[in-house]
Image: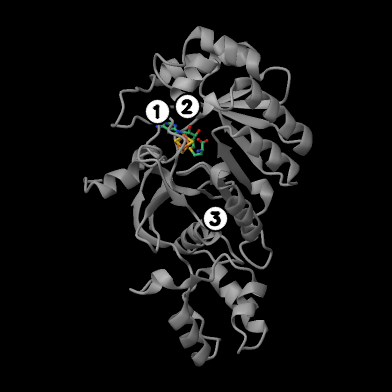
Amino acid sequence: MADENSKDKIALLGMSAKDISALLTDYPKFCGAQIFGFLADGKDFDEMTSLKKELRAHLCDNYIGNPVQILKTYEGKGGTKKYLFKMRDGNLIEGVFMPHVYGNTLCLSTQIGCRMGCTFCASGLDGLVRNLTVGEMLGQVVAVNRDNGGCAKNRKVDKLVLMGSGEPFDNYDNVLGFLKAVNDEKGLNIGERNISLSTSGLCDKIIKFADSGHKITLSISLHAPFDELRSALMPVNKAYGIDSIVASAKYYFAKTGRRVIFEYTLISGQNDSDGCAKRLAAITSGFPSHVNLIRLNEVKENDYRAPSVDAADAFLKKLQRLGVSATIRKSLGNDVEGACGQLRRRYMSGEEI
Ligand code: SAH
Ligand code: SF4
């Protein structure tokens, strides 16, 4: 549990065993690896009872373990749980845990807020507050794993999607550090096959990421097949238009052998016309890709509306008739206040949730 002065203390979660050892020069080297393992289990220092009492006291006085604290959980349908996390500086972020027979998935955040300003999204309404650290991303996974009865060797979180608040590629270095840390075989050991990341389409970073050797599933938020419409929904399109998005998706496939997923949030009267379906089919044909349709999660701060379930289904059928590989995704954690910054806003404004 974070104490009053913990804001100034260094968080050990997110560091390698070697880095932890290097901090503890007065103690045997193997302590670093032990502490690293306990932290991956989600233990507080006072639970690390196999460490000498004096070392535990030293850790409590000078460091903190997990910089992320679960503030509240909200249970939804089918075992879905929405988490509100508190950072040590008091900032809040959210995550969604979705149990599944094929493995439990956690949707986690990469930034507090977001500066991309997509007009339909609640995360970007107040702009970017700050980037999350490696420890704060890892801390969400460790906390949720433990909250569901897991530890490092017996995980209850199997898959990760970097789709909570924030633009992961706007926090590029920390996100790469997180992918390495969460993949550590002495830690949570979640492999890249089980991780996906969603970006609003920062093409230079997509290319850099493709060249980095990482091979996770990449989703690109497309949401509109015409530049003018996409720029109105997603200001980032003025910097990276649809042509460069398609070129970087092809590059990602060429480099990694992984087809890119295009996310397409259906907004009634905006991007669900026949013309949009035809253009979307033209854009995504000719290379391996998949379109993931999502019905808009309505946000009270704007007037956009979701199409009906039938209208969304009709759009899907049109795409499929045009030869597009496409599916409709059920909204993440819809019944527990959306997946994208809405829970945090409501909580902060003191509204009943
Ligand atoms: N910033 C990244 C990842 C986080 S958002 C991105 O934009 O891709 C995760 C997904 O949720 C994105 O596809 C985003 O466009 C979508 N999204 C945001 N607000 C939404 C809303 N109100 N309803 C449905 N999807 C939304
Ligand atoms: Fe940021 Fe993604 Fe929301 Fe756009 S949709 S404002 S990129 S979190």
| Residue identifier under label 2 | 234
Looking at numbered disc 1 in the image, what kind of residue is underneath it? Thr
Q: Quadrant of residue 124?
A: top left
Q: Quadrant of the N terminus?
A: bottom left
Horizontal side of residue 203 vs 47, given as left or right: right
Query: What percent of the width, then of the height, locates residue 95?
Result: 44, 49
Check whether the beta carbons of the residues at disc 3 and disc 2 lie within 8 A of each other.
no
Check whether the beta carbons of the residues at disc 2 and disc 1 lie within 8 A of each other.
yes
Q: How far apart, in angstroms, are the residues tagged by discs 3 and 2?
A: 32 Å
Q: Crowding at label 3, few (<14), some or many (≥20) Cα neighbours within 10 Å?
A: many
Q: Crowding at label 1, few (<14), some or many (≥20) Cα neighbours within 10 Å?
A: some
First in sequence: mark 2 or mark 1?
1
| Residue identifier under label 3 | 157
Outermost residue, front direction? 239
Looking at numbered disc 3 in the image, what kind of residue is underneath it? Val
First in sequence: mark 3 or mark 2?
3
Q: Crowding at label 2, few (<14), some or many (≥20) Cα neighbours within 10 Å?
A: many
First in sequence: mark 1 or mark 3?
1
Horizontal side of residue 89 vs 28, given as left or right: left
